[in-house]
Image: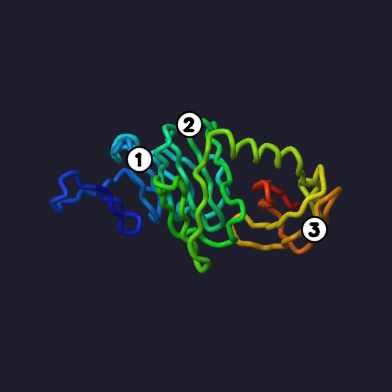
Amino acid sequence: MFTSKSDKLYTTTTGSGTWAQLTNYTGGFINSIAINPTNPLKVAIASNGAEKVHVTTDGGATWTSYKYDLPNFTALAVVWDNNGNDGLYVGMDYGIYYLDNTTSNSWKPFVNNLPNVKISELEINYVDNKLYTATYGRGIWRSPRYTTGTLSTINAELEEGISIYPNPAKGSFYITSAKEETASIRIFDGSGKLLYYLKDVKLSKQFKIDISKYTAGLYFVRINNEKGVVTKKLMVK
């Protein structure tokens, strides 16, 4: 059993009220803890630290960063999926991401049709095979669990069909789509703050966005349509 207080992590193996602090964890304020359903020594932590997600496979003696390519948002909730692939979902300030043994250390966006709000909690109901998501101010949402290959295929189609240019950009940039479709567009700064949101945009050959008031640095452009979502990095100079 694990529990936390601020950035301190504690464990007990007896359940008798005797807790020991795990001093090897130094990942920041802990928001959520998830124990792997098939391995009690494998534990994931979501935090507000720079590495976002940490995982231990030895009960807390050592920890490994699972940040990989996560966007620079705060990790607020985490849950394992008992799907045979060590599936792991993380809920953040904006959206949900998924990773398992088949995704090559790359987090996959899992936010299609989800409102643009903070994710407070994640739970899996294996009776109806749904992931349930508690949001800040927009109630509870549910979605079918990740199916190997399905989500990655959808995102690959979006990745191939949508691009942004110029990159780096100054003053403005364009979003182009291989075919005409309706999408919502969000732009976040490096700290995860939402700077731009426009829904029901008709994408075709190109769509221009003014960034003349943006300071130089890294931004994230998220494009969401009925097929799924793709997030692209944008450098502003």
Against 222, is 152 above or below? above
Q: Earlier in the sequence, mark 1 or mark 3?
A: 1
Looking at the image, residue 80 sits to the left or right of residue 61; the answer is right
For image coordinates 45% across by 45% down, the residue present is 129
Looking at the image, residue 62 sits to the left or right of residue 131; the answer is left
Q: Which residue is mark 2?
A: 101
Between 11 and 202, which is closer to the camera in this rendering?
202
For image coordinates 47% across by 46% down, the residue present is 89
- Secondary structure under badge 1? loop
How far apart, in angstroms, are the residues tagged by discs 1 and 3?
43 Å
Amino acid type for the residue under numbered disc 1: Asn
How far apart, in angstroms, are the residues tagged by discs 2 and 3?
37 Å
Q: Nearer the viewer, mark 1 or mark 3?
A: 1
Quadrant of the image occupied by residue 44: top left
Q: Which residue is mark 3?
A: 209
Rate crowding at label 3 as few (under 14), some (14 to 19) or many (20 or more) other CA atoms within 10 Å.
few
Between 51 and 17, which is closer to the camera in this rendering?
17
Q: Earlier in the sequence, mark 2 or mark 3?
A: 2
Q: Specify whether residue 10 is in view.
A: yes
Residue 56: x and y, percent? Answer: 35, 38
Against 136, is 2 above or below? above
Q: Which residue is mark 1?
A: 36
Residue 174: x and y, percent? Answer: 81, 51
Amino acid type for the residue under numbered disc 3: Ile
Against 98, is 195 above or below? below
Quadrant of the image occupied by residue 41: top left
User: Residue extending furthest left?
Assistant: 16
| Residues tagged 2 and 3 counted as in contact (Cβ below 8 A) | no
Quadrant of the image occupied by residue 85: top left
